[in-house]
Amino acid sequence: MSSDMKAEEQTVHNPIQIDPETCVKCNLCDWICPGDLIYKKEDNRETLPVIAYPDECWYCGLCQSICPVDAITVIFPDQMINCQTDVKTLLGKVID
Amino acid sequence: MPQKWNSLDTDVLVIGGGVAGCMAAIPALEAGLSVVVCEKGKVLDHCGSVGCGVDHYLTIMESGPEWDTPEFLIKHLPKLTDGIVDMAVASRVIHEMPKVVRKIESFGVNFKDPRFNDYYRLRSFGLPGTYHINFDGTEFKKHIGQRVRKLKGSVLTRTMAVQILVEDGRVYGAIVFNFRTGEWTVVRAKAVVLAAGEVNRISLNASGMAFDSWHCPYNTGDSQAMAYNAGALLTNMEFVETTITPKGFSAQGLNALVSEGAHFINKSGERFMFKYDEKGENARRAVIADAVINEYLLDNGPIYADCRHLPEDILDHMEATLQIDRYTMPAFYEQKALNFREEPIEVSISELSIRRSGVYFRGSGLAVDTDGQTSISGLFAAGDCASVSGGIAGAAVLGHVAGEGVASFVPKTNGSLPQIDMETADAIREKAMKHMEVEKERGLSWKAYEAEIRQTVNDYIGVRRNEAGLRHALQTLHALAKRETDLKADDLHGLMRIHESSSIRLNAELMATAALARDESRTGSSHYRMDHPDTDETNWKKFVIVQKGSEGAETTTLSASEPLAAAFARKN
Ligand SMILES: Cc1cc2nc3c(=O)[nH]c(=O)nc-3n(C[C@H](O)[C@H](O)[C@H](O)COP(=O)(O)OP(=O)(O)OC[C@H]3O[C@@H](n4cnc5c(N)ncnc54)[C@H](O)[C@@H]3O)c2cc1C
Ligand code: SF4
Ligand code: SF4
C-alpha cells in the first residue's frame, strides 16, 4: 500500500463563493447541501456559512438554487473546466 | 463513560428518504402504520439524487396506442435487458406505472409541458415507444417529500444507518447515528425498507475528483452492504454502469441530448453510432457508452456530442432546459466558454456506478420479490439498490409496491418484536467510535483508502475485465478490508464518510466476485470479459446471485426464466 495513504493536507479549490455582503445568514445552504459540507451556526444572524469540506462537493448547485438572495456562485476548478485527462486511462489495464 | 442510547419503536423504518424511500413511506402511512425515515440529508423535500430536479419520467400511461400498454412493454423486456430480468417483478412494476404516475400528479407534480399543456413524450435509450415524459421536474422531489410530512411520517435527519438488525432470518430494526450531534439510536421496527440508492465513488473519472460524479456521490451502496452483511441475496452486481458526459464534468444530460437529436461524432467528424446499433443515438445507454469506449480504443477520440445541425427551436428548448437535470450545467458551459449551439462538446465516459448498467428494469442490488421483499423476512428494498430499477419512475413504482408490501406484512407480525440485544448494539457503536481514536501514526485517511479502491476498480474491474485482473483486484480489496480498522475519523462527518468508504469497498468486492463468476460477456462494456468475449446464450441466461458465505462472498446462479424469489429460503 502506498505511503500517501497517510492523511495529508493539501490546498483545495473552493467550490462555492459566498458573497459576505449579500448573505442574510439564513442557514438554508447548510440545510440543503446533500454532502453535509456547509456549516452555519443555527439561530445566529452574525456568522457566515463555512465550507467545511470543499473537496467533497458534487457541484450540484443546490445551495445556489436555494439561496434566497443569490449570494452563492459555484466555481468549477481547472481540472473540470480544462480537463486534460486521456480518456483511454479510464478504460482499464489488461494483465495476463 | 458509556454513552447513552436513544431508542425508537416504529412499525416501519425506511432507510434513505429519496424517491423510493418516500414513495414506500406513503402507502405505509396511508395504511395507518407508524413510519420513521432515516436520512442523511436534512430536508426531505430536497434530499437524495434529485433534490435539484429531474427532466424525464418513464411511464406507461395507457393513452390509447398499443405501445402505451403494460403488455407491449413487458413483451420487449427480454430484448431490452439481454435476457437477464426478473420478469415477475418487472411486470408488476410496469403494471403499476399508470396508477403511480397519476398518484404522483395528485401530490402536485405537473408532468405537462406548458408549451402545449400536454405531456411531451419522447423516445430514448432503445425503448420501443415514446415512454419518457420530458417535463420540468424541478419540484418533483419536493412534492413527494411534502406528502410524507403531510401524512405525519417522522424523519431522522442527518442520520446514517450503519447496520440492520436481523435475528432468525427476520429483520427487526437498525442502528443509526446522527453525524452532526453524535447521537446513536436503536430503532426497532416490524419491517425495514432499504432505499439508500446505488453505489457511487467506486471508480475514476476524467476530472480525477471523487465527488464529481454523474450520480449522487453520497449514495455509496450502504443498503447493499448492510443487507449483504445480514445475509441477504444480491444480484446483477457484476454489471457496471457508465454514461457519456461533457469531459471534465460528470453530469446528467445524455437523455436530453439524444432524445432531442444530438449526434455523436469522432475526431474525423464521422457519425459513428450506426456502426454499433441500428437505432443510432437512440440506442440503449449501455450501447452508447460501449460505442464511445470503442471509438476511444480505436484512437478515434476525442469524441464529441454535436448539436449544430439541430433547428433553432430545438436548440432554444435545450438551452432553456439545460439546468433542469443538472442545475450547474449552464455555469459549466459558461465558465468553459463553450457554446453548444455552435461547437461540438467533447465527451468522456463517466466514472462507473453499480446501479442498473444502463439497462432499464435490470437493477443491480438486492434481489426482491413482487412485493419488494428481499430474501430476509420483513426486509424490503426499492430504488437504485434493488434488482428491478429504472430511474425516478422505477424508484417511485417499486417504492410504492414495497410500501404496499409492508402495509400487508406488518399486520401479520402480531406486533411482536424481539428485545434489542444491547451488547451487540454497544459493540457496533464501539467499533465505529474506535475510528475517532486511531492514533495519528497508524491512521489512514478515508480519501486515500477510497482512492486505492477507485484505482483498482478502474484498472481491473471496470469496462475491460479478465480473470487475472479480477483476481488481482480481489487480492487488493481483501487487503484493504484488513486495514479498515486503521481508518481515522477527524470528526463525526469523517466517521460518516468512513462508513461510506467501507460500503464502497465491499460493493467493489461483490462486483469483482460476481464478474469472475460470469465467464461470458453481456451488454457490451457493462460486463466485458476479454477472456470470454462472447455472449453465451446457451449457458448464461442466468442471474449471478451473491451472498455472504463462511469464507466471504459466494456466488450461485439461477436461470433467468425463474423469478429471483425462487432462490429465497424465507417462508412467508
Ligand atoms: C442530478 C440527477 C438527475 C437525474 N434525473 C433523472 C431524470 O430526469 N429521470 C430519471 O428517471 N432519473 C433521473 N435520475 C436518476 C434518479 O434520480 C434515481 O434513479 C432515483 O433517484 C433513485 O431513487 P432512490 O430512492 O433509489 O435514490 P435517491 O433518490 O438518491 O435516494 C437515496 C437516499 O438515501 C440516502 N442515504 C444514502 N445512504 C444512507 C444511509 N446509510 N443512511 C441513511 N440514508 C442514506 C441519501 O441521502 C438519499 O436521500 C437523476 C439522477 C441525478 C443524480
Ligand atoms: S442560503 Fe444564501 S443567504 Fe442563506 S446562509 Fe446560505 S449563502 Fe447566506
Ligand atoms: S454545490 Fe451541492 S454539494 Fe457543493 S456545496 Fe453546494 S449544495 Fe453542497
Image (spheres, coloured by chain):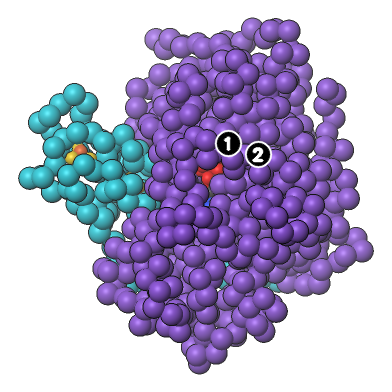
Does B267 appear above or below B148? below
- Circle 2 packing at 10 Å, graded few (<14), some (14-19), many (20+), is few
Label 2–label 1 contact, CB within 8 A: yes
Q: Position of residue B433 (x, y in %)?
A: 44, 25
Quarter placement of the C terminus of chain B: top right
| Residue at 53%, 79% in the rendered image | B264
Residue drawn at 49 percent across, 34 percent down: B107
The disc label shown at residue B103, or none: 1
Residue type indicated by callout 1: Lys
Quadrant where the N terminus of chain B sits is top left
Q: Which amino acid does the dot numbered 2 rest on?
A: Lys
Residue identified by numbered label 2: B99
Foreground residue, A24 or B556? A24
Q: Which chain is cyan?
A: A
Q: Position of residue B473 (x, y in %)?
A: 63, 57
Q: Are marks 2 and 1 on the same chain?
A: yes
Element assignment for label 2: helix
Q: Which mark is residue B89?
A: none
